[in-house]
Protein backbone atom coordinates (compact mmCIF):
# COMPACT_ATOMS: atom_id res chain seq x y z
CA UNK A 1 0.00 0.00 0.00
CA UNK A 2 1.30 3.47 -0.86
CA UNK A 3 0.13 6.89 0.19
CA UNK A 4 -0.10 9.71 -2.30
CA UNK A 5 0.86 13.34 -1.90
CA UNK A 6 1.44 16.32 -4.12
CA UNK A 7 4.01 19.08 -3.97
CA UNK A 8 1.18 21.43 -3.07
CA UNK A 9 0.04 19.55 0.02
CA UNK A 10 3.09 17.72 1.38
CA UNK A 11 2.31 17.06 5.01
CA UNK A 12 4.61 18.55 7.63
CA UNK A 13 4.49 15.19 9.40
CA UNK A 14 6.42 13.59 6.54
CA UNK A 15 9.89 12.30 7.27
CA UNK A 16 10.43 11.37 3.61
CA UNK A 17 8.39 12.49 0.62
CA UNK A 18 9.09 11.90 -3.07
CA UNK A 19 7.19 13.32 -6.02
CA UNK A 20 7.75 12.58 -9.73
CA UNK A 21 11.23 11.21 -9.09
CA UNK A 22 13.08 9.64 -12.01
CA UNK A 23 16.59 8.24 -12.00
CA UNK A 24 18.49 6.95 -15.02
CA UNK A 25 21.89 5.27 -15.07
CA UNK A 26 21.97 5.92 -18.79
CA UNK A 27 19.96 8.08 -21.18
CA UNK A 28 19.71 5.13 -23.56
CA UNK A 29 18.00 2.79 -21.04
CA UNK A 30 14.66 2.92 -19.20
CA UNK A 31 14.70 4.65 -15.79
CA UNK A 32 15.87 2.61 -12.83
CA UNK A 33 13.34 4.46 -10.66
CA UNK A 34 10.12 6.24 -11.58
CA UNK A 35 8.27 7.12 -8.37
CA UNK A 36 5.16 9.26 -8.73
CA UNK A 37 4.17 9.98 -5.13
CA UNK A 38 5.31 8.37 -1.91
CA UNK A 39 5.86 9.41 1.67
CA UNK A 40 6.83 8.05 5.06
CA UNK A 41 5.47 9.76 8.17
CA UNK A 42 7.63 10.77 11.10
CA UNK A 43 7.83 7.94 13.60
CA UNK A 44 6.56 5.36 11.08
CA UNK A 45 8.35 2.07 10.43
CA UNK A 46 8.33 0.93 6.80
CA UNK A 47 9.50 -2.33 5.29
CA UNK A 48 10.62 -1.92 1.69
CA UNK A 49 10.72 -5.17 -0.21
CA UNK A 50 12.44 -5.72 -3.53
CA UNK A 51 14.15 -8.53 -5.37
CA UNK A 52 17.86 -8.30 -6.13
CA UNK A 53 18.45 -5.73 -8.84
CA UNK A 54 15.13 -3.94 -8.33
CA UNK A 55 16.66 -0.58 -7.41
CA UNK A 56 16.56 -0.72 -3.59
CA UNK A 57 20.08 0.58 -3.09
CA UNK A 58 19.55 3.28 -5.72
CA UNK A 59 16.46 4.49 -3.85
CA UNK A 60 18.27 4.56 -0.51
CA UNK A 61 21.16 6.50 -2.02
CA UNK A 62 18.76 9.08 -3.43
CA UNK A 63 17.06 9.49 -0.04
CA UNK A 64 20.46 9.83 1.63
CA UNK A 65 21.56 12.44 -0.89
CA UNK A 66 24.36 10.30 -2.31
CA UNK A 67 22.74 10.05 -5.76
CA UNK A 68 20.92 12.87 -7.56
CA UNK A 69 17.74 12.06 -9.51
CA UNK A 70 17.44 13.58 -12.96
CA UNK A 71 13.90 14.69 -12.16
CA UNK A 72 11.60 15.25 -9.21
CA UNK A 73 11.35 16.43 -5.62
CA UNK A 74 12.95 14.55 -2.71
CA UNK A 75 11.79 16.12 0.55
CA UNK A 76 13.53 14.94 3.71
CA UNK A 77 12.07 16.56 6.82
CA UNK A 78 10.60 19.32 4.62
CA UNK A 79 13.95 20.01 2.95
CA UNK A 80 14.21 19.37 -0.79
CA UNK A 81 17.67 17.82 -0.77
CA UNK A 82 17.95 18.04 -4.55
CA UNK A 83 18.50 21.77 -4.04
CA UNK A 84 21.48 21.25 -1.72
CA UNK A 85 25.12 21.06 -2.73
CA UNK A 86 26.98 17.82 -2.01
CA UNK A 87 28.68 19.11 1.14
CA UNK A 88 25.33 20.37 2.42
CA UNK A 89 23.78 16.98 1.66
CA UNK A 90 26.53 15.19 3.58
CA UNK A 91 26.01 17.40 6.61
CA UNK A 92 22.23 17.06 6.39
CA UNK A 93 22.53 13.27 6.28
CA UNK A 94 24.93 13.22 9.22
CA UNK A 95 22.64 15.40 11.31
CA UNK A 96 19.28 13.84 10.53
CA UNK A 97 19.83 10.23 9.44
CA UNK A 98 21.24 7.09 10.99
CA UNK A 99 22.34 4.38 8.57
CA UNK A 100 22.82 0.69 9.38
CA UNK A 101 24.69 -1.24 6.70
CA UNK A 102 24.60 -4.92 5.86
CA UNK A 103 28.24 -5.36 6.90
CA UNK A 104 27.91 -2.83 9.79
CA UNK A 105 30.88 -0.77 8.42
CA UNK A 106 32.57 -0.32 11.79
CA UNK A 107 36.16 0.91 11.69
CA UNK A 108 37.98 -2.15 13.07
CA UNK A 109 40.93 -0.40 14.72
CA UNK A 110 38.78 2.16 16.55
CA UNK A 111 37.20 1.54 19.92
CA UNK A 112 33.48 1.04 20.36
CA UNK A 113 33.11 4.54 21.81
CA UNK A 114 35.00 6.12 18.89
CA UNK A 115 32.90 4.23 16.34
CA UNK A 116 29.70 5.39 18.01
CA UNK A 117 30.83 9.00 18.30
CA UNK A 118 31.56 9.17 14.57
CA UNK A 119 27.81 9.53 14.06
CA UNK A 120 27.67 12.90 15.80
CA UNK A 121 30.68 14.52 14.11
CA UNK A 122 28.40 16.85 12.11
CA UNK A 123 25.34 16.51 14.28
CA UNK A 124 23.82 19.30 16.34
CA UNK A 125 22.77 16.72 18.95
CA UNK A 126 25.70 15.99 21.24
CA UNK A 127 25.15 13.25 23.78
CA UNK A 128 27.19 12.85 26.94
CA UNK A 129 29.30 9.85 27.88
CA UNK A 130 26.62 8.91 30.41
CA UNK A 131 23.97 8.93 27.69
CA UNK A 132 26.16 6.74 25.50
CA UNK A 133 26.65 4.25 28.32
CA UNK A 134 22.90 4.18 28.92
CA UNK A 135 22.24 3.57 25.22
CA UNK A 136 24.70 0.67 24.88
CA UNK A 137 23.35 -0.90 28.07
CA UNK A 138 19.81 -0.64 26.65
CA UNK A 139 21.14 -2.45 23.59
CA UNK A 140 22.47 -5.28 25.76
CA UNK A 141 26.15 -4.29 25.71
CA UNK A 142 28.11 -3.98 28.95
CA UNK A 143 29.73 -0.56 29.45
CA UNK A 144 33.19 -2.14 29.76
CA UNK A 145 33.07 -2.90 26.02
CA UNK A 146 33.24 0.79 25.13
CA UNK A 147 37.03 0.87 25.06
CA UNK A 148 37.41 -2.42 23.19
CA UNK A 149 38.32 -2.28 19.50
CA UNK A 150 35.56 -3.16 17.05
CA UNK A 151 37.52 -6.10 15.61
CA UNK A 152 37.57 -7.70 19.07
CA UNK A 153 33.79 -7.99 19.22
CA UNK A 154 31.52 -10.86 18.27
CA UNK A 155 29.16 -10.45 15.31
CA UNK A 156 26.22 -9.92 17.68
CA UNK A 157 28.13 -7.24 19.59
CA UNK A 158 29.12 -5.52 16.34
CA UNK A 159 25.44 -5.45 15.38
CA UNK A 160 24.53 -3.63 18.54
CA UNK A 161 27.36 -1.16 18.13
CA UNK A 162 26.12 -0.43 14.59
CA UNK A 163 22.65 0.27 15.99
CA UNK A 164 24.11 2.45 18.75
CA UNK A 165 26.09 4.43 16.17
CA UNK A 166 22.97 4.97 14.07
CA UNK A 167 20.89 6.04 17.09
CA UNK A 168 23.45 7.95 19.16
CA UNK A 169 22.77 11.39 17.62
CA UNK A 170 19.01 10.80 17.86
CA UNK A 171 18.27 11.00 14.12
CA UNK A 172 14.77 11.61 12.82
CA UNK A 173 15.26 8.94 10.15
CA UNK A 174 16.91 5.50 10.34
CA UNK A 175 17.82 3.67 7.13
CA UNK A 176 18.66 -0.03 7.42
CA UNK A 177 20.04 -1.61 4.24
CA UNK A 178 19.74 -5.43 4.38
CA UNK A 179 21.25 -5.48 7.90
CA UNK A 180 20.02 -8.99 8.77
CA UNK A 181 20.84 -10.94 5.60
CA UNK A 182 23.74 -12.84 7.19
CA UNK A 183 22.04 -13.57 10.53
CA UNK A 184 20.33 -16.66 11.84
CA UNK A 185 16.60 -16.42 12.51
CA UNK A 186 16.78 -15.90 16.28
CA UNK A 187 19.49 -13.24 16.09
CA UNK A 188 17.69 -11.55 13.21
CA UNK A 189 14.39 -11.29 15.11
CA UNK A 190 16.11 -9.91 18.21
CA UNK A 191 17.93 -7.36 16.08
CA UNK A 192 14.74 -6.05 14.45
CA UNK A 193 12.83 -5.86 17.73
CA UNK A 194 15.74 -4.01 19.33
CA UNK A 195 16.00 -1.54 16.47
CA UNK A 196 12.28 -0.76 16.38
CA UNK A 197 12.08 -0.41 20.15
CA UNK A 198 14.88 2.16 20.17
CA UNK A 199 13.44 3.99 17.15
CA UNK A 200 10.06 4.25 18.88
CA UNK A 201 11.73 5.74 21.95
CA UNK A 202 13.22 8.51 19.78
CA UNK A 203 10.14 8.79 17.49
CA UNK A 204 12.43 8.05 14.55
CA UNK A 205 11.07 6.96 11.17
CA UNK A 206 12.54 3.64 10.01
CA UNK A 207 13.06 2.55 6.42
CA UNK A 208 14.13 -1.08 6.51
CA UNK A 209 15.10 -2.63 3.18
CA UNK A 210 15.27 -6.34 2.47
CA UNK A 211 14.54 -9.02 -0.12
CA UNK A 212 13.10 -11.25 2.66
CA UNK A 213 9.31 -10.81 2.73
CA UNK A 214 8.98 -12.73 6.00
CA UNK A 215 10.25 -9.67 7.91
CA UNK A 216 7.31 -7.49 6.89
CA UNK A 217 5.22 -8.45 9.94
CA UNK A 218 7.40 -6.32 12.24
CA UNK A 219 6.65 -3.02 10.53
CA UNK A 220 3.79 -0.51 10.31
CA UNK A 221 3.71 -0.57 6.53
CA UNK A 222 5.06 -2.74 3.73
CA UNK A 223 6.04 -1.37 0.33
CA UNK A 224 6.78 -3.52 -2.70
CA UNK A 225 9.30 -1.52 -4.73
CA UNK A 226 8.11 -3.12 -7.96
CA UNK A 227 4.59 -1.75 -7.35
CA UNK A 228 5.86 1.62 -6.13
CA UNK A 229 8.09 1.95 -9.16
CA UNK A 230 5.99 3.00 -12.17
CA UNK A 231 8.11 1.28 -14.80
CA UNK A 232 6.46 -0.83 -17.46
CA UNK A 233 9.45 -2.60 -19.00
CA UNK A 234 11.76 -5.03 -17.20
CA UNK A 235 15.33 -3.93 -16.79
CA UNK A 236 18.32 -4.43 -14.55
CA UNK A 237 18.81 -2.07 -11.63
CA UNK A 238 21.32 -1.76 -8.82
Image (cartoon, rainbow, N blue to C red):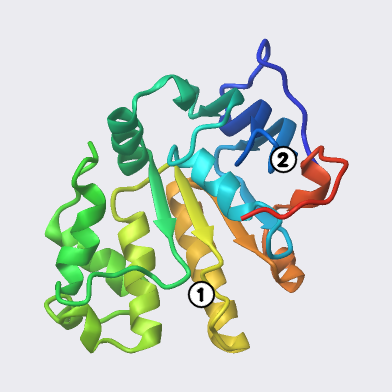
The secondary element bearing badge 1 is classed as helix
Q: Could you say where residue 211 lies in the image, as x and y percent from the top left?
A: 69, 67
| Mark 2 surroundings within 10 Å by alpha-carbon count, few (fewer than 14), some (14 through 19), many (20 or more) | few
Q: Identify the residue position indicated by label 2 in the image.
A: 29
* Circle 1 crowding by C-alpha within 10 Å: few under 14, some 14–19, many from 20: many
> Where is residue 29, by image quadrant?
top right
- x, y percent for residue 223: 75, 50
User: 106 above or below 100?
Assistant: below
Q: Residue at x 54, y 79 (%)?
A: 190
| Tag 2–tag 1 contact (CB < 8 Å) | no
Q: Is residue 153 left or right of residue 62?
A: left
Residue at 59 percent across and 58 percent down: it is 208
Q: Residue furthest top?
A: 8
The residue that label 1 is drawn on is 191
Q: Nearer the viewer, residue 130 or 90?
A: 90
Q: Is residue 173 above or below residue 11?
A: below
Amino acid sequence: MTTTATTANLKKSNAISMHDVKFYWSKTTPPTLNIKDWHIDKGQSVFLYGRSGSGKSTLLNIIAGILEPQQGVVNILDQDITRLGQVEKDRFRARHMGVIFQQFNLIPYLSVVDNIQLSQTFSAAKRSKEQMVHLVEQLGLPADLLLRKANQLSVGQQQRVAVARALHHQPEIIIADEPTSALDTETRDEFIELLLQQAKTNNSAVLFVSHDKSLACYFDQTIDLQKLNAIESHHHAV
